[in-house]
Image (tube, rainbow, N blue to C red):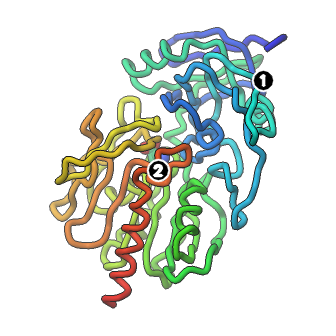
Amino acid sequence: MENAKSVKLVLEDGTEIEGQSFGAFTSAAGEVVFSTAMTGYPENLTDPSFAGQILVLTYPIVGNYGVPGEELYESISKIFESDKIHVAGLVVNYYSEEHSHWHAAKSLGEWLAEYNIPGIYGVDTRMLTKKLREKGAMLGKIVAEQDVPLHDPNQDNLVAQVSPDGVQHYGTGQHKIVLVDCGTKTNIIRCFLERDVELIRVPWDYDFTQLDYDGLFLSNGPGDPKMCVPTIEHLQKALQQDKPIFGICLGSQLMGLAAGGDTFKLKYGHRSHNQPVKLTGTQRSYITSQNHGFAVDTKTLPAEWDMLFENLNDGTCEGIKHKTKPFFSTQFHPEAAGGPQDTEFLFDQFLDEVEKYKAGK
Ligand SMILES: NC(=O)CC[C@H](N)C(=O)O
């Protein structure tokens, strides 16, 4: 880009990388994490699970397909994963202000600027990723004119910041599902609304145990799952009952904690569209979309719980399952806007469990 201003990326280990500014010319601090996904920046940047994080994209050319215009589906975004950009900053190698796509309405830089989010380009993001893989995710900052202090977003209750204030209803299907919104991706809502569901979307700390529902869904969300104390308490009550429960990503971690297990922080997390997982008890594996920095510690799961999926790269827990009750979760994203959609059938399995529960009542 002509006349781009200089900015730098500073990491907590003292690394300083000079680059050029795109998006907002402003400074921002956060946890620096990388994603190896090759496409999907409109979906990634609006995923509330990225709140507080500076995202490094390893794919070398970013921006060339622009950013789509907004369209609504049942009052939620048809395209984006929420109604704003959630990353704290974006780090890319080559940024293409010029873009071409039938759906593009603006450039990536214009879109970032609208939300006052800084981008830096001209960074060797593969070298940076090797560093993050060796040392683990680090705190960092993009520095424009004003310096800012480093800040660890995992010390904040990010879920409280991204969760909605009130209850919302969608759809008129026959299965009444409560969605506990800890920062849900809108594609989770779309996946439910494409099925026979009436959805009740509630805030993260809402006491859903008072509601009349057929199945409970726990969404993804940012930060350390242990911050969600009220959600875990409500969930513990739900685990005493037999109504089906399905959790995705943060939702999986919350299920693990409510069950009595523990979670831990991975060295650098899993963020990409091609993470292989294996279904326990089979030789079947799936390619999945992931975005997480924490995981359930399989060793700490109580006797009545099993690991449901295992990550084939590092053996960590990618989902859990109760041995006798219809409670299960995935650490990956079966809804996966940006793809792949190989595991979307899990929404159908959850609703099958809901049907069985209703038939047996
Ligand atoms: N996408 C998510 O729900 C992420 C969950 C949690 N914040 C983690 O990083 O592990």
The correct choice, above or below, for 337 with respect to 178 in the image is above
Mark 1 nearby-residue class (10 Å; few <14, some 14–19, many ≥20): some
Residue at x 34%, y 82% (from the top left corner)? 357
Label for residue 148?
none
- Residue at 67 percent across and 11 percent down: it is 19
Earlier-in-chain disc, 1 versus 2: 1
| Residue 269, horizontal then vertical, whole percent | 40, 34
Q: Secondary structure at mark 2?
A: loop
Q: Is the residue marked 2 within 8 Å of ligand 1, measured from its CB? A: no
Q: Residue 266 falls in which quadrant of the image? A: top left
On the image, numbered disc 2 is attached to which residue?
341
Q: Give the quarter of the figure containing the N terminus.
A: top right
Amino acid under disc 1: Glu
**Camera-side residue: 80 or 339?**
339
Extreme residue toward the right, this view: 3
Q: Position of residue 303 (x, y in %)?
A: 15, 61
Assign a secondary structure to mark 1: loop
221 lies above or below 117: below
Residue 98, numbered circle: 1
Position of 251 compared to 83: left or right? Answer: left
Q: Amino acid at mark 2?
A: Gln
Residue 200 is drawn in which quadrant? Answer: bottom right
Counting from the top left corner in percent of width and height, residue 187 is at 57, 56
| Observer able to see residue 315 | yes
User: Can see residue 207?
Assistant: no
